[in-house]
């Protein structure tokens, strides 16, 4: 169990990750960012979900747009117009204290103790590095859901090259992934391997999770002919629970920031000398390319099941 700050553009799979984190980690705070929804909606969603799931954590408002690019539309077709399936009225405000300042303040106060978990665009993390570069050596670990490297055909999910979180702000992603932060990257190569059927979600006996997932499951059934969902963001928490469930390689990482491959994550594949080395001076990072899908799924379902929670009381 770790002390974590969860950085999220909270949509449906983010909400599942938040619920899992609240049951397996010490949640110091939730920092929100644009992505699946606007940042105002992300704050509202975090407050609503925490209330309904009895999660006690402060919520902060982060960046509203990418570092350099024009903003792109939220992912309403996947997560619903409000990001949580449109099933609950949301009376909460989108205002909150500054997320980037909270990250900087928390890490400086407890060097080497706080793990950052980023499951949305990396704009808040990049902004924190820009404002306080000294935190690079003070973060215990940064675990990111993002990217795709083509393992077994698992490439982009928003373009043929790019995963959504990285594509939303490729400049922030390139800055963070090429930094000296100790990073674990959990890309589509592994998240697409951990699929949970709709029946398993309904069997959790978690009315809130079931309700918010309905439109997500409908989209999956329509587009992919699968009644279920990839856990995606949840696998960052699975890494914290047991890293032995994952097979990782170490390599420097860069992100393409323009052109038809904008948002593509690339790792250094050779040590051969080259005239122009885009990976020079980049810290090798851990990239998850294999996963024990059954172990990850089994623990997730057990931790989230209503019956299991009642038995522990």
Image (tube, rainbow, N blue to C red):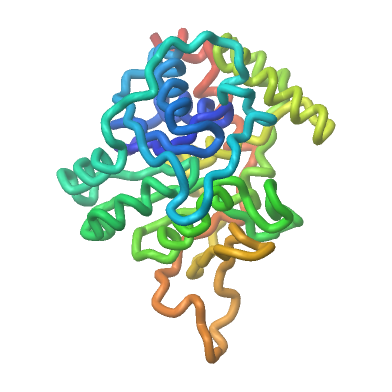
Q: Residue at 32%, 19% (x, y): give it.
A: 56
**Quarter occupied by residue 258:** bottom right
Please state, as top left, top right, bottom left or bottom right, where the C terminus lies in the image: top left
Is residue 220 found left or right of 104 in the rendered image? right
Provide residue 244's location: percent of width, then percent of height: 50, 49
Residue 207 placement (x, y as % from top left): 58, 9
Q: Determine the residue positioned at 48% across, 59% down.
A: 171
Above or below, 146 against 29 in this view is: below
Q: How many marks?
A: 0
- Is 235 situated left or right of 226 in this image? left
Closer-to-camera residue (51/236):
51
Which residue lies most toward the left here? 109
Please indicate, yes or no, whether residue 246 appears anywhere in the rendered image: no
Residue 65 image point, x, y percent: 45, 44
Q: Is residue 207 visible?
A: yes
Q: Position of residue 153 (x, y in %)?
A: 76, 56
Name the foreground residue: 267 vs 113: 267
Determine whether 5 is above or below 215 in the image: below
Residue positioned 52% across, 9% down in the render: 89
**Residue nearest the observer in this picture, 127 or 234:** 127
Q: Quadrant location of the N terminus?
A: top left
**Above or below: residue 289 compared with residue 206:** below
Where 147 sits versus 292, above or below?
below
Kindly identify the residue that appears in the image at 56 percent across and 35 percent down.
36
């Amino acid at each position: 169990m770790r002390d974590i700050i969860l950085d999220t553009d909270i949509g449906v799979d983010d909400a599942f990750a938040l619920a899992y984190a609240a049951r397996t980690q010490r949640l110091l705070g939730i920092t929100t960012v644009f992505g699946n929804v606007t940042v105002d909606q992300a704050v509202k969603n975090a407050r609503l979900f925490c209330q309904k799931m009895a999660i006690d954590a402060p919520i902060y408002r982060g960046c509203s747009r990418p570092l350099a690019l024009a903003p792109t539309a939220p992912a309403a077709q996947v997560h619903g117009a409000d990001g949580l399936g449109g099933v609950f009225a949301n009376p909460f405000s989108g205002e909150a204290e500054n997320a980037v300042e909270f990250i900087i303040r928390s890490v400086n106060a407890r060097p080497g103790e706080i793990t950052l978990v980023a499951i949305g665009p990396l704009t808040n993390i990049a902004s924190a590095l820009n404002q306080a570069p000294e935190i690079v050596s003070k973060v215990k670990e940064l675990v990111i859901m993002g990217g795709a490297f083509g393992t077994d055909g698992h490439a982009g999910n928003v373009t043929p090259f790019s995963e959504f979180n990285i594509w939303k702000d490729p400049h922030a992603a390139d800055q963070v992934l090429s930094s000296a932060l100790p990073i674990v990257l959990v890309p589509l190569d592994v998240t697409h391997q951990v699929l949970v059927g709709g029946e398993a979600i309904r069997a959790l006996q978690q009315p809130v999770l079931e309700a918010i997932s309905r439109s997500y499951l409908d989209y999956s059934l329509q587009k992919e002919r699968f009644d279920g969902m990839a856990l995606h963001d949840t696998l960052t928490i699975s890494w914290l629970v047991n890293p032995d469930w994952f097979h990782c390689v170490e390599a420097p990482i860069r992100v393409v920031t323009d052109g038809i491959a904008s948002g593509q994550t690339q790792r250094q594949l050779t040590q051969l000398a080259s005239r122009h080395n885009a990976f020079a001076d980049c810290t090798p990072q851990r990239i998850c390319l294999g996963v024990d899908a059954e172990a990850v799924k089994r623990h997730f379902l057990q931790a989230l099941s209503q019956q299991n929670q009642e038995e522990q009381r």
